[in-house]
Amino acid sequence: MRIAVVSLAALALIAGAGYWAMSASDGSSPTVQLYPDDRQRTANGRLIYRQSCASCHGRELEGQPEWRKAGPDGLMPAPPHDETGHTWHHPDAVLFTLTRDGLGAVLGENASYTSAMPAFGDTLTDEEIVDVLSYIKSTWPEDIRATHDDINARAANG
């Protein structure tokens, strides 16, 4: 298995800032549960992914070429969502907030990391976003899914 090497600074920024930016107005972290073993939800997620995400992230979750390097426009290309990318490095709540509310909601509005990914909160329901993320997780090998479950457990325990 090939695992992508991600800039540690970018990962720390996304994971750390993402975790703290995710807190609800009462200071608690939102609860998000994915359903990678639910065939109905992952099938729905696959359809939504193909309609809303595949044009950038690839039909087979492969991402855009040279996704680790900013393009001429200064924006980061869409990363893969398969096991070669860094999606599985982030807790469910961070992935959900990033998808629904955009990168600024995770990193803060003054972050220097920029991407072209829009927020989908106005076009997809929360349930549809969970279905898409469930579909993505359902494609990962078992060892990656287990590692992602551990990441979620650590995030839940603060």
Image (tube, helix red, strand yellow):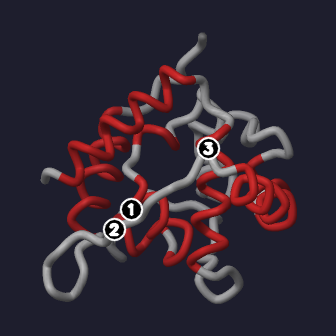
2 and 1 marks in contact (CB < 8 Å): yes
Residue 29 numbered mark, or none? none
In the image, residue 142 above or below residue 13: above
Residue 15 in the figure: left or right of residue 145: left
Q: Is residue 69 visible?
A: yes
**Residue at position x 51%, y 61% from top?**
114
* Mark-to-mark CA distance, 2 and 1: 7 Å
Lower position in the chain sequence, tag 3 or tag 1:
3
Q: Position of residue 25 (x, y in %)?
A: 21, 88
* 139 or 61, nearer to the observer: 139
Say which residue label 2 marks: 31
Tell me if mark 1 has few (under 14), some (14-19) or many (20+) residues whose alpha carbon lies within 10 angstroms of its own.
many
Where does the N terminus fall, quadrant-wise?
Answer: top right
Task: State the residue at coordinates (21%, 43%).
Answer: 154
For the residue labelled by badge 2, is the local secondary structure a helix, a strand or a loop?
loop
Q: Along the line of sight, which residue is nearer the eye, 50 or 80?
A: 50
